[in-house]
Amino acid sequence: MTWLTIAAAVVVGLALLLRWRRPAWYWLTFGIVFTALRIRFRYATVMDACHLTVPASRLRLTLARWSKKPAPQQRVPRLLWLLPTRTGVRLRIKMWPGQDAFEFSAAADRLRHSFAVHQVTSREVKPGVVEITLTGYDVLKHVQMPAKTDRRHLKIPVALVEDGSVHYRDYREVPHSVTVGATQSGKSVLQRTVIKELAAQPVALVGIDCKKVELGPFARRFSALADNPEDAADLLEALVARMEGTYDVIRREQRISADIADAEIAANIWDLPEDLRPVPIVVTIDEIAELAMSTKRNDPRRDRIITALIRLAQLGRAGGIFLDIYGQRFGSELGDGITMLRAQLTGRTVHRVNDEATAKMAFGDISPHAVFAATQIPNTRRGMAVVGYSTGEWVRIRTPHTSMRQAVSACNRHAHLTPDLPELARFKPADDVATLAATATAAVAKAA
């Protein structure tokens, strides 16, 4: 008995140590077993306590009344299967007639306490079936991306979702996005992560950075870079001209006739033959306020910038031009046209904000719950954000820390993939110190 007691004490001590220092290891060794047993033994009781049961059928009630037997108990939703995962457990539940998937979503917090897990989310997979994801520990405390992710052309992993899944930035599905957040909230980390992942793909990177410090270090991988509002206006208009030229190519290749199959009619760059398909362009704007705000009431340069941005947001997807806009605020106080531009940006990401109004700028037309979640992000969780979808759904994510050196190294390593775009040749950044020095000397001489 002494040796058994010592062994049990060692196991318990090891479990507590892992739960404190290595939650992921604890979950894979002990947590899965404990949670699975807890679900199996408590399932019916928890469903009843959370009001997720339905009364017995009228036939059973009638038979019980005729036979003078006790009334049958409430019917519990049937548990179809239980699947342990790397970060939690997934349950598939068959609902009874009369039940709704919203009932399970509303009971998520009660299920979290009943099953003693960190997080519970619910979604309807098909009529009559819901999937409940139980997260065993706080996966956003120390973000560790899975070793294998679904990387494709213009689809990159950028963050970890609170349920343990991976959040992807898919430009084919969500062509344009806006990221809002206060200073030191993690916007720059997300920006570096996106650039680091895109650097290895056959795409053209275009940047607008009026602060001159965020995108400049990545110059070797950028096909065009503007660091002041005047150059930004010219660059955006050059992108619009390239987009119009791309549409002319698509129009020439349509050749619609009676003997052409519908699937072969070109409507965007992805329908073009590979030898004619222009390289897609991802435009990164570091601080939208530097472009949208002006001291003049009617500033022609600002009007050029906003008009070009709206045209790119409305028409750029089919032409292979995608926008990533970052800023501390993105509201109507930035001037005319901002609300119209924001309506074209499908992707919405909000980091920690200093006021509720900033969160409403991004999520006010999506979900009030997302607005509340964005205002609850603590200062200690840099990189944590809320992502909202046009369907009204939202999730919490956190980006793994990507240092400036890691992003710069990736850009330098893949500098040979930088395409030359003739329309943007004058905006191509200098890639060596000698060229930068010569440019600076020429500018000084011109000014003198």
Image: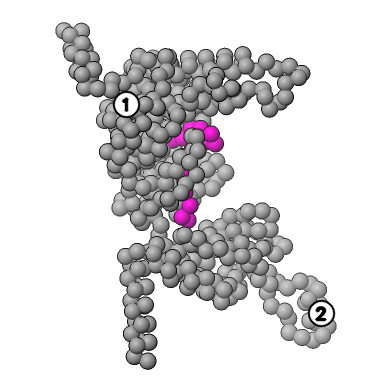
> Horizontally, is 68 left or right of 127 in the view?
right
Residue 291 in sight:
no
Marker count (numbered): 2
> Could you tell me which residue is drawn at 28 percent across and 30 percent down?
217
Magenta extent: 163-178
**Residue type beneath disc 1:** Arg
> Horizontally, is 267 left or right of 413 in the view?
right
Residue at numbered disc 2:
63
Above or below, 279 against 251 in this view is below
**Residue type beneath disc 2:** Leu
Above or below, 224 against 39 in this view is above
Please, which residue is most extreme toward the left here? 448
Residue at numbered disc 1:
220
Q: Which of 420 and 46 is in front in this view?
A: 420
> Could you tell me which residue is drawn at 30 percent across and 40 percent down?
406
Q: In which quarter of the image is the C terminus?
A: top left
Q: Which picture quadrant has residue 418?
A: top left
Q: Where is residue 395 in the image (x, y as percent from the top left)?
A: 48, 50
Question: Callout 1: 10 Å neighbours few (<14), some, many (20+)?
Answer: many
**Mark 2: secondary structure:** helix
Q: Where is residue 394 in the image (x, y as percent from the top left)?
A: 50, 48
Distance, label 2 to label 1, CA atoms, is 79 Å
